[in-house]
Image (tube, rainbow, N blue to C red):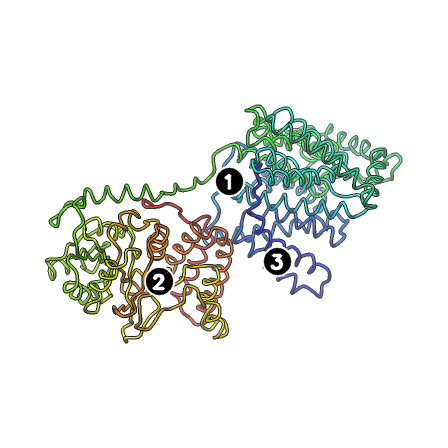
């Protein structure tokens, strides 16, 4: 939830909205309990993937379900909202169990909010010790305790600016939809959600530079203004009016202008609606009646509560206090307490001056921001907080003044830097400079990286625990290329020593740590100056003539930047080594293949996707990308690209390389007439070690090139991980079960690394 609402996150509303609809349907009757359980599972799954949606979805869906189910009992409304929050907290607990809990954002209100929560707990115990009823004590605890609860969830799930943008889009869109539906429905309703959404929408419209988007935001703000005006709740009018006045006084000129334009637009829309919609006319009549009506019981109730406070001004009468048999003039005889129709009276009667002072201390850090500077990012939230604090003096808490916990958190988080700073993404130009610097300092027996490129082929082989596999690879390369560089990533089986002793002509670079495949390749290619560079896995054996054929194709086709042979397995059968660029559809096809779906379905889904294979022995084919197990690339193109992207520890660096090459105007060629035998899995066959790395790289690729598909990808991977853990557990396969567990953790992490060459 933010002052700058982005419309690009609107498609993410689908899953939480679907979960809320299921909740509304499932709550209709006890016979639909299985559907209700499915609804809760849908909500938990949505909150697992999108933790930022816990609060906005709970608020919007709770309000929608209340209207759909026709709930009028405060207890039922509280239970529904608490159930929504419970689903969110369960999802957050699961993420914490997986080690993927969002990083909580600390603010200046942390200490007073923690004190407020502690006082509520102590007040509940004190009230029970005084003999107050357990039910009234629990109700009173909820009314005040909901404030630090909402504050805590907000600082836990909305610490990053991107999360607040998405949450704000979800909340504002939902509020506008509910307002539009409400205006078409006769009766007395609306107000609170519209008031909370109005200010950020106005500020977003004022700061929007695109005329079309600004007009759409202003139209939404006008709709919310009409809904507030016809809501027939004087406390909401007061809160919205104070907030608008504060923004007009402390905001920028553009924000003031936007407020006046939207108010004029709201008047025009309202006048037009009166003549066109009987429902709007009915709402106006209700508003007029409420404006002239007097709630005769509020002042007598407040008097009773203040009398309780006067008897015990320091700590009140404990949570759950009540005074039986009080006659309220012009109303009825009633038991007053523990909740009064003025929030501050409730606080004073139940917790005394101590509870009120701590509550005020929790609000002050956010209110101070109003004096900081004009038009700051916290302005809409601080202004709303001031408005709702004023309205709380005249408003009953009903399902709790949860906005007094949400608004301080948003104001304070918007004012300061994000809890996590996004990693600085390295541009291709920066990668090129770093790569050239590495080559300039790579002086060895074979020459300097700054020397002019010479005709010939250099091969780079990256090893890790490859002592038993690398011999045939190097023997085949020795007959095919002009220079071989082996980069060993801290193998414990003596790979580097073995190569130095058996193949003295090979240049060996031994890393003290496993720096990853891409970084090791860049270390090796920095020690070459040939016009063709081959990347070869240590368990890959080139057939005679393969290397020269690949270089020949590059030399005779100026538009080709990368060439790859046909790969064969240990039995001599072709394996998939060239593919289309990855999409969400190819992920579904490849990760839900085998026994999980009908045998024909994966083939149908993968037609033309990553699993597409080019076979045969015909002419060269142009493909999207080729496996890095064996490929040749022009040396000057590799330098122009800045080497491989070291943000990938392992996997997907070959797809990234081919994608970047194509963006530079160089195509990728597949030569089925030449081959190399690739055994595969030479470094490690442990799924618990390898699979999580694969999926982390997949998420990074999508974050860089398919950002709109990233949320769907996370959902797909979490679902696949759940299936994988279940199947592996049933079959008694411990390592695959652990692998899928780790994949779930990877999928639920806040954001894939977006750094470039230096990560």
How far, Cα to Cα, is label 2 from label 3? 48 Å
Q: Which mark is residue 161?
A: 1
C-alpha gap between disc 2 and disc 1: 42 Å
Marks 2 and 1 in Cβ contact (< 8 Å): no
In what quadrant of the picture does the C terminus appear? top left
Locate residue 186, reporting x and y percent: 81, 47
Q: Which of disc 1 and disc 2 is earlier in sequence?
A: 1
Q: Secondary structure at mark 1?
A: helix
Is residue 344 visible in the rendered structure shown here? no
Q: Dot 2 corresponds to which residue?
A: 622
Asked if residue 677 lies left or right of residue 58, the reply is left
Q: Position of residue 495 (x, y in %)?
A: 18, 59
Neighbour tally class for label 2: few under 14, some 14-19, many 20 plus, Cα within 10 Å:
some
The answer to whether residue 625 shows anywhere in this view is: yes
Residue 350 against residue 514 in the figure, above or below: above
Residue 633 location, quadrant: bottom left
Question: Which is closer to the viewer, label 2 or label 1?
Answer: 2
616 relative to 731 in the view: left or right: left
Q: Which residue is mark 3?
A: 40
Q: Residue 240 placed where, x, y %?
A: 70, 33
Discs 2, 3 touching: Cβ within 8 Å: no
Name which of mark 3 and mark 1 comes first in the sequence. 3
């Amino acid at each position: 939830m933010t002052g700058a609402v982005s419309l690009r996150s609107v498609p993410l509303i689908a899953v939480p909205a679907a979960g809320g609809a299921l909740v509304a349907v499932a709550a209709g009757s006890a016979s639909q309990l299985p559907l209700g359980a499915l609804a809760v599972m849908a909500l938990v799954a949505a909150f697992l993937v999108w933790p930022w949606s816990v609060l906005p979805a709970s608020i919007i869906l709770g309000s929608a379900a209340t209207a759909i189910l026709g709930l009028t009992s405060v207890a039922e409304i509280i239970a529904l909202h608490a159930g929504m929050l419970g689903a969110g907290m369960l999802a957050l607990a699961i993420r914490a169990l997986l080690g993927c809990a969002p990083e909580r954002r600390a603010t200046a209100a942390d200490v007073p909010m923690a004190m407020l929560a502690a006082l509520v707990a102590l007040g509940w115990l004190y009230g029970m010790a005084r003999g107050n009823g357990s039910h009234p004590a629990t109700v009173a605890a909820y009314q005040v305790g909901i404030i630090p609860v909402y504050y805590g969830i907000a600082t836990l799930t909305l610490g990053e600016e991107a999360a607040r943008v998405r949450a704000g889009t979800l909340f504002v869109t939902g509020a506008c939809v509910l307002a539009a539906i409400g205006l078409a429905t006769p009766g007395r309703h609306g107000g609170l959600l519209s008031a909370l959404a109005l200010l950020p929408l106005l500020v977003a419209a004022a700061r929007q530079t695109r005329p079309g988007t600004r007009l759409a935001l202003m139209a939404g703000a006008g709709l919310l203004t009409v809904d507030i005006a016809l809501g027939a709740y004087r406390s909401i009018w007061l809160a919205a009016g104070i907030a608008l006045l504060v923004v007009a006084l402390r905001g920028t000129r553009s924000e003031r202008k936007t407020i006046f334009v939207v108010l004029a637009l709201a008047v025009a829309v309202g006048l037009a609606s009166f003549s066109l919609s009987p429902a709007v006319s009915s709402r106006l009549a209700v508003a007029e009646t409420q404006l002239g009506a007097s709630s005769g019981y509020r002042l007598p109730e407040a008097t009773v509560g203040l009398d309780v406070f006067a008897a015990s001004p320091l700590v009140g009468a404990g949570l759950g206090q009540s005074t039986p048999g009080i006659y309220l003039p012009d109303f009825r005889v009633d038991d007053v307490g523990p909740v009064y129709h003025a929030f501050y009276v409730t606080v004073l009667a139940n917790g005394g001056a101590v509870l009120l002072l701590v509550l005020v201390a929790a609000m002050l850090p956010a209110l101070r921001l109003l004096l900081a500077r004009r038009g700051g990012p916290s302005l809409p939230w601080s202004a709303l907080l001031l408005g709702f604090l004023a309205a709380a003096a005249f408003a009953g808490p009903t399902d709790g003044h949860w906005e007094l916990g949400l608004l301080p958190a948003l104001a304070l988080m918007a004012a300061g830097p994000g809890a996590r700073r996004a990693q600085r993404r390295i541009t291709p130009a920066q990668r090129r400079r770093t790569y050239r610097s590495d080559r300039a300092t790579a002086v060895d027996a074979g020459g300097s990286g700054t020397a002019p490129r010479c005709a010939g082929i250099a091969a780079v082989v990256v090893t890790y625990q490859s002592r038993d596999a690398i011999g045939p690879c190097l023997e085949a390369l020795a007959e095919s290329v002009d220079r071989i560089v082996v980069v060993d990533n801290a193998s414990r089986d003596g790979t580097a020593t073995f190569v130095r002793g058996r193949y003295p002509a090979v240049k060996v670079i031994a890393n003290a740590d496993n720096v990853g495949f891409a970084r090791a390749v860049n270390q090796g290619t920095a020690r070459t100056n040939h016009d063709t560079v081959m990347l070869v896995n240590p368990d890959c054996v080139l057939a005679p003539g393969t290397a020269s054929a690949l270089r020949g194709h590059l030399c005779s086709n100026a538009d080709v930047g990368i060439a790859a042979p046909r790969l064969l397995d240990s039995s001599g059968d072709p394996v998939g080594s060239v593919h289309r660029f990855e999409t969400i559809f190819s992920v579904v096809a490849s990760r839900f293949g085998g026994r999980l779906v009908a045998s024909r379905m994966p083939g149908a889904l993968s037609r033309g996707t990553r699993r597409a294979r080019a076979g045969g022995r015909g002419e060269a084919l142009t493909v999207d990308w080729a496996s890095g197990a064996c490929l040749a690339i022009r040396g000057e193109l590799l330098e122009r690209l800045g080497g491989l992207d070291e943000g990938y520890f392992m996997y997907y660096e070959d797809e990234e390389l081919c994608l970047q090459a194509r963006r530079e105007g160089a195509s990728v060629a597949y030569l089925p007439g030449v081959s190399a035998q690739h055994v595969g899995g030479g470094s490690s066959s442990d799924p618990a070690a390898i699979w999580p790395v694969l999926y982390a790289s997949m998420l990074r690729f999508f974050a860089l090139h398919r950002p709109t598909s990233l949320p769907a990808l996370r959902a797909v991977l979490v679902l696949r991980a759940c299936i994988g853990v279940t199947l592996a557990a049933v079959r008694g396969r411990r390592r695959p079960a652990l692998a899928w567990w780790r994949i779930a953790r990877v999928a639920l992490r806040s954001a894939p690394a977006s750094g470039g060459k230096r990560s």
